[in-house]
Image (cartoon, grey):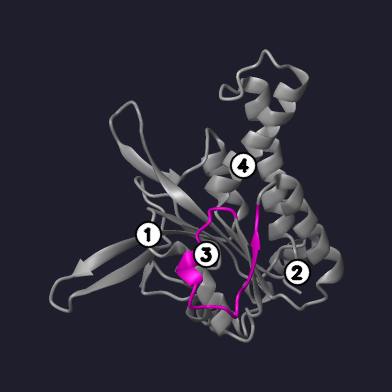
Amino acid sequence: MPANDSIRDDLGVISPDQIEFLNLLVYGEPGVGKTYLAGTAQDHTKTAPVLLLDVEGGTTTLRHRPDIDVVQVRSMVQVVEVHNKLKVENNGYYKTVIIDSLTELQKLDMSDIMKELVSRRPDRDPDVPDVREWGKTGTHMRNIVRAFRDLPMNTILTALVDASKDSTGTVTLYPNLPGKMKTELAGFFDVVGYLYTRPDEEQEEITRIIQFTGTQKIIAKDRTGCLGHWMENATIPAMFDIIHSNNKGKK
Protein backbone atom coordinates (compact mmCIF):
# COMPACT_ATOMS: atom_id res chain seq x y z
CA MET A 1 0.00 0.00 0.00
CA PRO A 2 1.44 3.44 -0.95
CA ALA A 3 2.45 5.62 1.98
CA ASN A 4 -0.14 8.28 1.18
CA ASP A 5 -2.93 5.66 1.22
CA SER A 6 -1.66 4.33 4.55
CA ILE A 7 -1.78 7.69 6.30
CA ARG A 8 -5.19 8.46 4.77
CA ASP A 9 -6.54 5.20 6.18
CA ASP A 10 -4.95 5.86 9.58
CA LEU A 11 -6.56 9.28 9.75
CA GLY A 12 -9.96 7.96 8.74
CA VAL A 13 -10.21 10.16 5.66
CA ILE A 14 -13.59 9.78 3.91
CA SER A 15 -13.37 9.17 0.18
CA PRO A 16 -16.05 10.56 -2.17
CA ASP A 17 -17.63 7.15 -2.77
CA GLN A 18 -18.45 6.97 0.95
CA ILE A 19 -20.81 9.98 0.78
CA GLU A 20 -24.09 8.19 1.37
CA PHE A 21 -26.39 11.07 2.28
CA LEU A 22 -26.91 14.58 1.00
CA ASN A 23 -26.72 17.36 3.54
CA LEU A 24 -27.64 20.69 1.99
CA LEU A 25 -28.20 24.27 3.11
CA VAL A 26 -30.03 26.33 0.48
CA TYR A 27 -30.62 30.03 1.04
CA GLY A 28 -32.11 32.91 -0.91
CA GLU A 29 -34.73 35.64 -1.04
CA PRO A 30 -38.35 34.88 -0.06
CA GLY A 31 -40.28 33.30 -2.90
CA VAL A 32 -37.38 32.04 -5.03
CA GLY A 33 -38.35 28.40 -4.50
CA LYS A 34 -36.31 27.12 -1.55
CA THR A 35 -39.19 25.10 -0.08
CA TYR A 36 -40.23 23.89 -3.53
CA LEU A 37 -36.68 22.69 -4.25
CA ALA A 38 -36.42 20.89 -0.92
CA GLY A 39 -39.79 19.24 -1.51
CA THR A 40 -38.58 17.61 -4.74
CA ALA A 41 -36.76 15.12 -2.51
CA GLN A 42 -40.11 13.30 -2.45
CA ASP A 43 -39.59 12.45 -6.15
CA HIS A 44 -36.67 10.00 -5.75
CA THR A 45 -36.72 6.54 -4.21
CA LYS A 46 -33.43 7.24 -2.41
CA THR A 47 -34.65 10.49 -0.82
CA ALA A 48 -38.33 9.71 -0.12
CA PRO A 49 -40.35 9.59 2.10
CA VAL A 50 -39.74 13.16 3.27
CA LEU A 51 -40.49 14.73 6.66
CA LEU A 52 -40.76 18.53 6.62
CA LEU A 53 -40.39 20.57 9.81
CA ASP A 54 -42.30 23.74 8.98
CA VAL A 55 -41.01 26.58 11.14
CA GLU A 56 -41.71 29.33 8.63
CA GLY A 57 -45.34 28.54 7.89
CA GLY A 58 -44.46 28.01 4.24
CA THR A 59 -46.26 24.74 3.57
CA THR A 60 -48.66 26.50 1.20
CA THR A 61 -45.79 26.21 -1.28
CA LEU A 62 -46.24 22.43 -1.08
CA ARG A 63 -50.03 22.36 -0.99
CA HIS A 64 -49.88 20.29 -4.20
CA ARG A 65 -47.69 17.73 -2.37
CA PRO A 66 -49.96 15.90 0.11
CA ASP A 67 -47.45 13.04 -0.11
CA ILE A 68 -44.99 15.02 2.06
CA ASP A 69 -45.45 14.64 5.83
CA VAL A 70 -45.37 17.99 7.64
CA VAL A 71 -44.81 18.86 11.30
CA GLN A 72 -45.77 22.39 12.34
CA VAL A 73 -42.98 23.54 14.67
CA ARG A 74 -43.89 25.88 17.50
CA SER A 75 -41.04 25.39 19.99
CA MET A 76 -37.44 24.21 20.18
CA VAL A 77 -38.53 21.45 22.55
CA GLN A 78 -40.63 20.08 19.72
CA VAL A 79 -37.64 20.16 17.34
CA VAL A 80 -35.54 18.19 19.83
CA GLU A 81 -38.35 15.66 20.27
CA VAL A 82 -38.60 15.14 16.50
CA HIS A 83 -34.84 14.65 16.26
CA ASN A 84 -34.84 12.09 19.06
CA LYS A 85 -37.67 10.13 17.46
CA LEU A 86 -35.88 10.10 14.11
CA LYS A 87 -32.67 8.96 15.78
CA VAL A 88 -34.27 6.13 17.75
CA GLU A 89 -37.46 5.13 15.95
CA ASN A 90 -37.09 6.00 12.26
CA ASN A 91 -35.34 2.76 11.22
CA GLY A 92 -34.82 4.04 7.69
CA TYR A 93 -38.45 4.99 7.00
CA TYR A 94 -37.98 8.73 6.39
CA LYS A 95 -35.03 9.14 4.05
CA THR A 96 -34.97 12.95 4.11
CA VAL A 97 -35.71 15.54 6.78
CA ILE A 98 -36.21 19.20 5.87
CA ILE A 99 -36.09 22.16 8.27
CA ASP A 100 -37.77 25.20 6.74
CA SER A 101 -36.23 27.50 7.73
CA LEU A 102 -33.06 27.86 9.79
CA THR A 103 -33.59 31.64 9.92
CA GLU A 104 -36.97 31.24 11.59
CA LEU A 105 -35.72 28.42 13.82
CA GLN A 106 -33.10 30.73 15.33
CA LYS A 107 -35.75 33.40 15.95
CA LEU A 108 -37.97 30.80 17.61
CA ASP A 109 -35.06 29.70 19.79
CA MET A 110 -34.34 33.26 20.89
CA SER A 111 -38.03 33.76 21.66
CA ASP A 112 -37.98 30.66 23.88
CA ILE A 113 -34.82 31.88 25.60
CA MET A 114 -36.29 35.31 26.31
CA LYS A 115 -39.60 33.90 27.59
CA GLU A 116 -37.73 31.72 30.06
CA LEU A 117 -35.53 34.65 31.11
CA VAL A 118 -38.46 37.03 31.66
CA SER A 119 -40.28 34.38 33.70
CA ARG A 120 -37.34 34.56 36.13
CA ARG A 121 -36.57 38.25 35.71
CA PRO A 122 -39.71 40.27 34.90
CA ASP A 123 -37.59 43.44 34.75
CA ARG A 124 -35.89 42.28 31.54
CA ASP A 125 -37.15 43.54 28.18
CA PRO A 126 -38.16 40.43 26.18
CA ASP A 127 -37.14 42.15 22.94
CA VAL A 128 -33.57 43.01 24.01
CA PRO A 129 -31.31 39.96 24.40
CA ASP A 130 -27.82 40.55 25.75
CA VAL A 131 -24.51 38.79 25.13
CA ARG A 132 -25.47 35.84 27.33
CA GLU A 133 -28.68 35.18 25.39
CA TRP A 134 -26.91 35.47 22.04
CA GLY A 135 -24.33 32.98 23.27
CA LYS A 136 -27.05 30.54 24.32
CA THR A 137 -28.87 30.68 21.00
CA GLY A 138 -25.59 30.19 19.14
CA THR A 139 -24.88 27.07 21.17
CA HIS A 140 -28.42 25.76 20.66
CA MET A 141 -28.31 26.28 16.90
CA ARG A 142 -24.90 24.61 16.49
CA ASN A 143 -26.13 21.61 18.49
CA ILE A 144 -29.38 21.33 16.50
CA VAL A 145 -27.72 21.60 13.10
CA ARG A 146 -25.04 19.05 14.01
CA ALA A 147 -27.62 16.67 15.45
CA PHE A 148 -29.83 16.68 12.34
CA ARG A 149 -26.86 16.60 9.98
CA ASP A 150 -25.52 13.50 11.71
CA LEU A 151 -28.74 11.51 11.38
CA PRO A 152 -28.47 8.53 8.98
CA MET A 153 -30.61 10.27 6.36
CA ASN A 154 -30.54 13.16 3.90
CA THR A 155 -30.82 16.56 5.58
CA ILE A 156 -31.95 19.77 3.88
CA LEU A 157 -32.19 23.13 5.62
CA THR A 158 -33.36 26.39 4.09
CA ALA A 159 -32.58 29.95 5.13
CA LEU A 160 -33.29 33.47 4.02
CA VAL A 161 -30.47 35.59 2.60
CA ASP A 162 -28.67 38.46 4.32
CA ALA A 163 -26.64 41.07 2.42
CA SER A 164 -23.78 42.27 4.62
CA LYS A 165 -21.52 45.20 3.70
CA ASP A 166 -17.93 45.32 5.00
CA SER A 167 -15.75 48.36 5.69
CA THR A 168 -14.73 48.57 2.02
CA GLY A 169 -18.32 48.66 0.85
CA THR A 170 -18.24 45.11 -0.54
CA VAL A 171 -21.60 43.37 -0.18
CA THR A 172 -21.53 39.62 0.56
CA LEU A 173 -24.56 37.34 0.59
CA TYR A 174 -24.84 34.99 3.58
CA PRO A 175 -27.52 32.76 5.09
CA ASN A 176 -29.63 35.09 7.23
CA LEU A 177 -28.41 34.28 10.74
CA PRO A 178 -27.01 36.52 13.49
CA GLY A 179 -23.31 37.24 13.90
CA LYS A 180 -20.84 34.40 13.44
CA MET A 181 -23.65 31.87 12.97
CA LYS A 182 -24.01 32.84 9.31
CA THR A 183 -20.59 31.37 8.52
CA GLU A 184 -20.25 28.79 11.32
CA LEU A 185 -23.49 26.93 10.55
CA ALA A 186 -22.83 26.99 6.81
CA GLY A 187 -19.58 25.19 7.60
CA PHE A 188 -21.48 22.17 8.92
CA PHE A 189 -22.88 21.26 5.47
CA ASP A 190 -21.30 19.44 2.54
CA VAL A 191 -23.29 21.56 0.09
CA VAL A 192 -24.33 25.19 0.49
CA GLY A 193 -26.24 26.72 -2.41
CA TYR A 194 -27.43 30.25 -3.08
CA LEU A 195 -30.77 30.12 -4.91
CA TYR A 196 -32.01 32.97 -7.07
CA THR A 197 -34.25 33.51 -10.09
CA ARG A 198 -33.67 34.92 -13.55
CA PRO A 199 -36.57 36.00 -15.77
CA ASP A 200 -36.55 34.63 -19.32
CA GLU A 201 -38.49 37.26 -21.27
CA GLU A 202 -38.47 35.28 -24.52
CA GLN A 203 -39.99 32.18 -22.93
CA GLU A 204 -42.03 34.21 -20.42
CA GLU A 205 -40.71 31.94 -17.70
CA ILE A 206 -38.64 32.22 -14.56
CA THR A 207 -35.45 30.17 -14.31
CA ARG A 208 -34.31 29.11 -10.85
CA ILE A 209 -30.52 29.03 -10.48
CA ILE A 210 -28.62 27.56 -7.53
CA GLN A 211 -24.94 28.51 -7.22
CA PHE A 212 -22.52 26.11 -5.53
CA THR A 213 -19.23 27.95 -6.05
CA GLY A 214 -18.31 30.47 -3.39
CA THR A 215 -17.06 33.91 -4.43
CA GLN A 216 -16.09 37.13 -2.71
CA LYS A 217 -19.76 38.11 -2.85
CA ILE A 218 -21.57 34.81 -2.31
CA ILE A 219 -21.16 32.15 0.40
CA ALA A 220 -21.50 28.74 -1.29
CA LYS A 221 -19.63 25.43 -1.55
CA ASP A 222 -19.77 21.85 -2.75
CA ARG A 223 -17.51 19.47 -0.84
CA THR A 224 -18.57 16.61 -3.12
CA GLY A 225 -16.96 18.36 -6.09
CA CYS A 226 -19.71 17.00 -8.35
CA LEU A 227 -22.33 19.69 -8.86
CA GLY A 228 -20.37 22.24 -10.87
CA HIS A 229 -20.57 25.99 -10.43
CA TRP A 230 -24.37 26.20 -10.71
CA MET A 231 -27.52 24.39 -11.87
CA GLU A 232 -30.65 25.68 -13.58
CA ASN A 233 -34.05 24.53 -12.29
CA ALA A 234 -32.31 22.04 -10.03
CA THR A 235 -34.13 19.29 -8.16
CA ILE A 236 -32.98 17.18 -5.25
CA PRO A 237 -33.24 13.96 -7.33
CA ALA A 238 -30.99 15.49 -10.01
CA MET A 239 -28.45 16.64 -7.42
CA PHE A 240 -28.51 13.28 -5.63
CA ASP A 241 -27.98 11.35 -8.87
CA ILE A 242 -25.14 13.61 -10.04
CA ILE A 243 -23.29 13.22 -6.75
CA HIS A 244 -23.69 9.46 -6.62
CA SER A 245 -23.04 8.78 -10.30
CA ASN A 246 -19.87 10.88 -10.20
CA ASN A 247 -18.68 9.16 -7.05
CA LYS A 248 -19.43 5.65 -8.31
CA GLY A 249 -16.29 3.64 -8.69
CA LYS A 250 -13.95 6.25 -7.14
CA LYS A 251 -11.30 4.89 -4.80
Task: Judge whether residue 2 is colored magenta.
Answer: no
Looking at the rendered structure, the secondary structure element under dot 4 is helix
Q: Which residue is mark 2?
A: 152
Q: CA distance from mark 4 to mark 3?
A: 17 Å
Q: Nearer the viewer, mark 4 or mark 2?
A: 4
Residue 59 — which label? 3
How packed mark 2 is, by other alpha carbons closer than 10 Å (few <14, some 14-19, many 20 or more), is: some
Q: CA distance from mark 3 to mark 1?
A: 12 Å
Q: CA distance from mark 4 to mark 2?
A: 26 Å
Q: CA distance from mark 4 to mark 1?
A: 21 Å
In the image, the segment drawn in magenta is: 55-73
Looking at the rendered structure, the secondary structure element under dot 2 is loop
Q: Which residue is mark 1?
A: 31
Q: Which residue is mark 4?
A: 108
User: Which percent across, then down, holds residue 84?
Assistant: 82, 58
Three-letter code for the amino acid on which mark 3 is drawn? Thr
